[in-house]
Amino acid sequence: AQTVTQSQPEMSVQEAETVTLSCTYDTSESDYYLFWYKQPPSRQMILVIRQEAYKQQNATENRFSVNFQKAAKSFSLKISDSQLGDAAMYFCAYKKGGATNKLIFGTGTLLAVQP
Amino acid sequence: GAVVSQHPSRVICKSGTSVKIECRSLDFQATTMFWYRQFPKKSLMLMATSNEGSKATYEQGVEKDKFLINHASLTLSTLTVTSAHPEDSSFYICSARDGLAIQSYEQYFGPGTRLTVT
């Protein structure tokens, strides 16, 4: 069975600094996707970034980038130039390839941004 | 962009009654919808997957007779919590997959419904 592990329950970063959130996963599949979702206090789930397993290049979305280490099954999220609005719960998620397959979420990391 | 709505956003019901939560895709056809439950400061737990026109597939440990899911149209899925008890109090979130999306990873989340059973 696939699993997703986030070993950092809470993290803190100073405004304008950089922070990295860790995520590891376990799967025997070759076709899969990895995601980082943000859940602010409003509880609305927001997709931050995604990575297709077949792509070697790390995904980047503005201040957000990932370090995808396929052999190590590691998928960390780097937030650069942290802003107060980045404060939220961040979930790492895995999805097996295929249209209807479900998302498997990690336990989440609560990120605080200090002014 | 793709929008998913949920109604109601908050509901309080008495123990023993049933409550229905709606999940709608506003601008796309949702061939598949997912229902999650989230406890405070916890992760999302998938309850069931529903495909339009078919019976829902429930995750292990989820009582299908207690959490009734209907996905009768391409834009609407409902979750009915029957004979609710205080332990059913939680935050319920739906997500929907765009049936016409080329990329199979596309899922869009609703804003969630907070259920409180008194």
Image (tube, coloured by chain):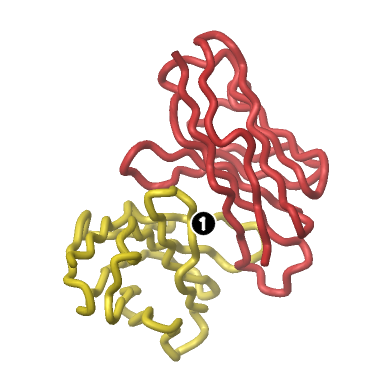
Q: Residue at x 38, y 59 (%)?
A: A91
The three-letter code of the residue at mark 1 reads Leu
Res A33 visible: yes
Identify whether A87 is placed above or below B85: below
Identify whether B68 is placed above or below A95: above
Q: Which residue is mark 1?
A: A103
Pinpoint residue B87: horizontal percent, then vertical percent. Answer: 41, 20
Q: Residue furthest bottom?
A: A57
Most foreground residue, A22 or B26 = B26
Left or right of A10? Residue A91 is right
Left or right of A110? Residue B83 is right
Left or right of A113? Residue B43 is right
In the image, the chain rendered in red is B
Left or right of B58? Residue A10 is left
Most foreground residue, A3 or B51 = B51
Q: Residue at x 56, y 55 (%)?
A: A102
Can you say which quadrant of the picture contains the C terminus of chain B? top left
Quadrant assignment, res A40: bottom left
Q: Secondary structure at mark 1?
A: strand
Pinpoint residue A7: horizontal percent, then vertical percent. Answer: 22, 59
Pinpoint residue B32: horizontal percent, then vertical percent. Answer: 70, 52
Can you say which quadrant of the picture contains the N terminus of chain B? bottom right
Most foreground residue, B76 or A57 = B76
Q: Crowdedness of circle 1 by 10 Å Cα count: few (<14), some, many (20+)?
A: many
Quadrant assignment, res B108: bottom right
Most foreground residue, B49 or A72 = B49
Rendered hue of chain A is yellow
Identify whether A86 is placed above or below B58: below
